[in-house]
Image: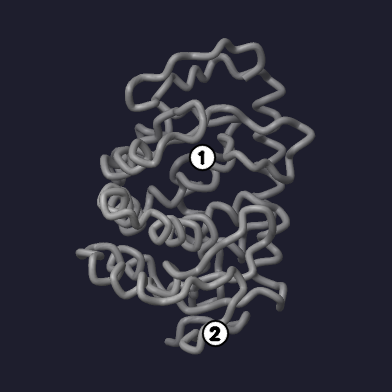
Amino acid sequence: MLGMPAERPAADFTIDQDWPAYAPEEHQRWQTLFQRQAAQLPGRAAEEFLAGLDVLGMVGEGIPDFRRLNEVLWRRTGWKVVAVPGLVPDAVFFAHLAARRFPATRFIRPADHLDYIQEPDVFHDVFGHVPLLANPVFADFMAAYGRQGVAALDRNRLDNLARLYWYTVEFGLVRTGAGLRIYGSGIVSSRAEVLYSLEDPRPRRIAFDLERVMRSRYRIDAFQETYFVIDDYHDLFAALDRDLSPVYERVGALPVLAPGEASGEDRLVPLDAGVQP
């Protein structure tokens, strides 16, 4: 926020969003980002994501006020958005998710970095992540991910669990009756990757398999070389609603795969794939 002094966070790293302090040009920047993404997403984003945008009323006059979002979100799924100053420690992040709180940064990217910013900003966090938290199944999955994150830290398995987050929450695709659709926040908030993920023949699109995902490295500085495709959000919740100790043991005995590397057990998903009636 323009000219805003640094605020000392609470013990859980939360701060006040201080929505009135946003400058008009910051709200306009949100509108620019929102309008160009909203124009791309119909027919490409998952219906559950678009429905979340609608029910949360994000088509407004600028950066959403977290308090207003939370009034709707809490009634639907028991979640709320909390403001944080930036990236938070892993243990803090997982504890928030387990308690059905989504940590979101309050700053918005500068005008000369509209297409890409390495550190998540309020547009990525709120536009990209929050709409699906209005979906009960996905909301339960995210809380389960938080609980598993706490356990993964104790087991020194954070790398494996971080790959699951990357390839689903950030860069996931879902198969629908109308074909592949985007639900990952890293795609829906990126103008260029929306088209690349669904239309470019170069990346590998693989049917979701938890252990395959946990073995797969990723890149943060380029388009994804591999996308994983779920058939339903219940697939994600079911993958985590159990003791993962045997999964970690099996994965730990297998080689780690490079971002675009193939595996003999991969089930490739064609670009025009849809759920069979």
Task: Tell me the crowding category of disc 1: few under 14, some 14 to 19, or many 20 or more residues within 10 angstroms, Cα based.
Answer: many
Instruction: Please tell me in which quadrant of the rendered image residue 120 appears.
Output: top right
Q: Position of residue 133 (x, y in %)?
A: 39, 48
On the rendered image, what quadrant is the C terminus found in? bottom left
Q: Which mark is residue 72?
A: none
Relative height, residue 238 to residue 219 (above, below)? below
Relative height, residue 214 to residue 127 (above, below)? below
Q: Which mark is residue 268?
A: 2
Instruction: Please tell me in which quadrant of the rendered image residue 194 appears.
Output: bottom right
Q: Which residue is mark 1?
A: 126
Q: Specify whether 226 is left or right of 200.
A: left
Residue sitting farthest toward the right: 112
Q: Specify whether 4 is left or right of 163.
A: right
Q: Specify whether 199 is left or right of 175.
A: right
Q: Secondary structure at mark 2?
A: loop
Amino acid identity at mark 1: Val
Q: Position of residue 64 (x, y in %)?
A: 52, 31
